Image: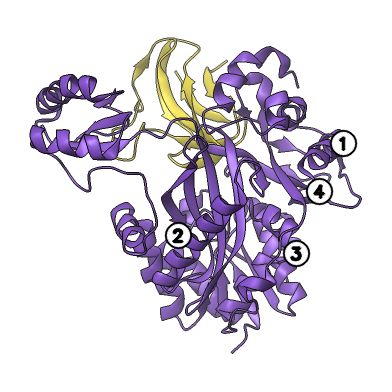
Chain colours: A yellow, B purple
């Protein structure tokens, strides 16, 4: 089964730590367990989304600033 | 010309509150909403609703162009901004007026003046309102600093002019410490920020947060007494009261008079709140800032004065002069409001959006619950965690606290964790019951009582 990173919370997904900063990760990046891949904003609080598996990012399914549900796929991994 | 159709540029409980006020005045309502709020109570209650964009607030509730377009499309002749979002955005107030509508609030210029810390401080100074004593600008000279420190009084805060976010702050308890810390602070500021300039500000220890509600029509202003909001967590108010239990009558009169003076000095129009720090020990109060909008905790003022503040601000925006003389405003009894938030107090207040499975609301004399909840409502994760405000009124403060405890027991919000257990504990606390608190009281209390905050 293909590996995925799911949103742990409902909220707004952000790919970068601040509007003027680069993305945490890009398509094709290798990731280790515990790497931050984005933020979820829930009721004005920001929560880091961390990789629970090591591997390589195939692509981001969720866009920056996209509203997401808990359990929704954020990232497809190779 | 009176307002005939009001657009509400907000959401949640305050949108519901504004619709109720408009209805009472025979005014039609237009509720703008994001895609996440299609099923909200405010949308259901309003005469018309317009979708103004995606869930993200920057694309909907903060989108000035879309809100103005919605107002024009529905023929609204006024806009109420509520609190938060665009409520204190001078550019929004200007845009509403430029589009030929009325803004339910002060002019863009008044928002600009009172929204700027230095300008507001200068306005306070000109109106003779006391503010936190300090250097009125940066200090580069040690001798000048020593003379000023003696005048301001101790303890005193030394802040780096180029610092920020709490960095570069030192506190001196007396002149001896000050003489020692001042050169150190200057050298450190120079090393850390490339600028040795410093500011001085008096430290107000164990201050209470006390604020005065005012109403103005651009010519004249009145006050509706004070609220005390000293119970705060991370600078967010948690429990609010009117009147303050700590204020002697003579200080109350002085405080409220100063607020009216400042409001009149800036020709204030609408509802506004002047926030102060109050020092029990010296009975001195210091102006901090003015909020140029309706506030979350306005209901406690309504409960003790019988004045509907939201209706009054709509009437004023419609061109009516103030309907009250100061002598018409009387306070009676004591009111308390607690904020019911979608947060789990047992887990460091983590946000808790989700579906409301059951809702039981307390009622009876002196009990009010301002909310946007209904059974089956899905609390979206995109906005503030405020679900509702439980407000009680009784003849005395002790009776109000007892009523609050009973009302909290009767309040049932099923499906998600809320801050109700926190308020139940606070209502039983001896310090809360004797109003023995200040703005830094709640956070240590939360640490001490973490084990009892089981939801």
Label 3, label 4: how far apart the Cα atoms are: 27 Å
Q: Residue at x 51, y 81 (%)?
A: B101
On screen, residue A17 versus residue B268, left or right, reads left
Give neighbour class at mark 4: few <14, some 14-19, many 20+ (Cα, 10 Å): some
Marks 2/1: CA–CA distance: 36 Å
Dot 3 or dot 2, earlier in sequence: 2
Mark 3: give few (<14), some (14-19) or many (20+) Cα within 10 Å: some
Q: Which residue is mark 3?
A: B306
Residue at mark 4:
B374
Above-or-below relation of B38 to A30: below
Q: Nearer the viewer, mark 4 or mark 1?
A: 1
Mark identifier at residue B88: 2
A8 vs B452, left or right, is left
Q: Is residue B452 above or below residue B175?
A: above
Chain for disc number 3: B
Q: Chain of mark 2?
A: B
Q: CA distance from mark 3 to mark 2?
A: 26 Å
Name the mark nearer the viewer: 3 or 2: 3
Q: Is residue B204 above or below residue B306?
A: above
State the residue at coordinates (31%, 23%). B173
Q: SS of the residue at dot 2?
A: loop
- Where residue B38 sits: x, y (%)? 68, 56
Dots 3 and 4: beta carbons under 8 Å? no
User: On what subunit does the disc labeled 1 rest?
Assistant: B
Residue in front for this viewpoint, B104 or B239: B239
């Amino acid at each position: 089964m293909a590996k995925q990173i799911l949103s742990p919370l409902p909220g707004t997904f952000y790919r970068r730590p601040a509007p003027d900063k680069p993305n945490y990760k890009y398509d094709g990046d290798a990731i280790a367990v515990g790497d931050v891949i984005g933020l979820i904003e829930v009721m004005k609080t920001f929560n880091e989304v961390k990789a629970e598996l090591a591997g390589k990012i195939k692509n981001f399914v969720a866009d920056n600033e996209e509203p997401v549900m808990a359990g929704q796929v954020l990232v497809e991994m190779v | 010309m009176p307002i005939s159709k009001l657009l509400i540029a907000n959401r949640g409980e305050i949108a519901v509150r504004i619709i109720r006020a408009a209805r009472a005045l025979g005014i039609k309502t237009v509720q703008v909403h994001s895609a996440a709020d299609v099923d909200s109570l405010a949308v259901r209650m309003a005469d018309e609703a317009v979708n103004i964009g995606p869930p993200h607030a920057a694309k909907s509730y903060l989108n000035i162009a879309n809100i103005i377009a919605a107002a024009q499309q529905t023929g609204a002749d006024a806009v109420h901004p509520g609190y938060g979002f665009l409520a204190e955005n001078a550019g929004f107030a200007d845009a509403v007026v430029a589009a030929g509508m009325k803004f339910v609030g002060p002019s863009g210029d008044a928002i600009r003046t009172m929204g700027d810390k230095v300008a507001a401080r200068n306005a306070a100074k000109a109106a003779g309102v006391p503010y936190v004593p300090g250097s009125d600008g940066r200090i580069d000279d040690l001798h000048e600093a020593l003379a000023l420190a003696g005048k301001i009084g101790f303890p005193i805060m030394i802040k780096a002019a180029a610092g920020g976010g709490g960095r570069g702050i030192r506190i001196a308890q007396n002149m001896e410490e000050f003489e020692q810390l001042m050169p150190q602070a200057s050298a450190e500021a120079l090393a850390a920020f490339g600028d040795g300039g410093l500011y001085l500000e008096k430290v107000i220890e164990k201050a209470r947060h006390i604020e005065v509600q005012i109403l103005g029509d651009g010519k004249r202003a009145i006050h509706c007494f004070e609220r005390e909001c000293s119970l705060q967590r991370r600078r967010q108010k948690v429990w609010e009261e009117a009147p303050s239990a700590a204020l002697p009558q003579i200080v109350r009169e002085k405080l409220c008079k100063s607020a009216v003076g400042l409001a009149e000095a800036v020709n204030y129009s609408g509802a506004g709140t002047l926030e102060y720090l109050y020092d029990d020990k010296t009975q001195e109060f210091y102006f901090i800032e003015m909020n140029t909008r309706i506030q979350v905790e306005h209901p406690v003022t309504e409960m003790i004065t019988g004045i509907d503040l939201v209706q009054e601000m709509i009437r004023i925006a419609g061109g009516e002069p103030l309907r009250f003389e100061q002598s018409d405003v009387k306070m009676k009894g004591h009111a308390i409001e607690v904020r019911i938030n979608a947060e789990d107090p047992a887990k460091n207040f983590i946000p808790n959006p989700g579906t409301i499975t059951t809702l039981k609301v307390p009622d009876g004399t002196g009990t009010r619950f301002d909310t946007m909840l209904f059974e089956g409502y899905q609390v979206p994760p995109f906005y503030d965690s405020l679900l509702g405000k439980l407000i009680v009124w009784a003849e005395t403060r002790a009776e109000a606290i007892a009523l609050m405890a009973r009302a909290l027991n009767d309040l049932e919000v099923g499906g998600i964790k809320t801050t109700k257990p926190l308020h139940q504990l606070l209502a039983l606390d001896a310090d809360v019951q004797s109003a023995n608190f200040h703005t830094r009281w709640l956070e240590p209390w939360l640490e001490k009582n973490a084990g009892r905050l089981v939801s």
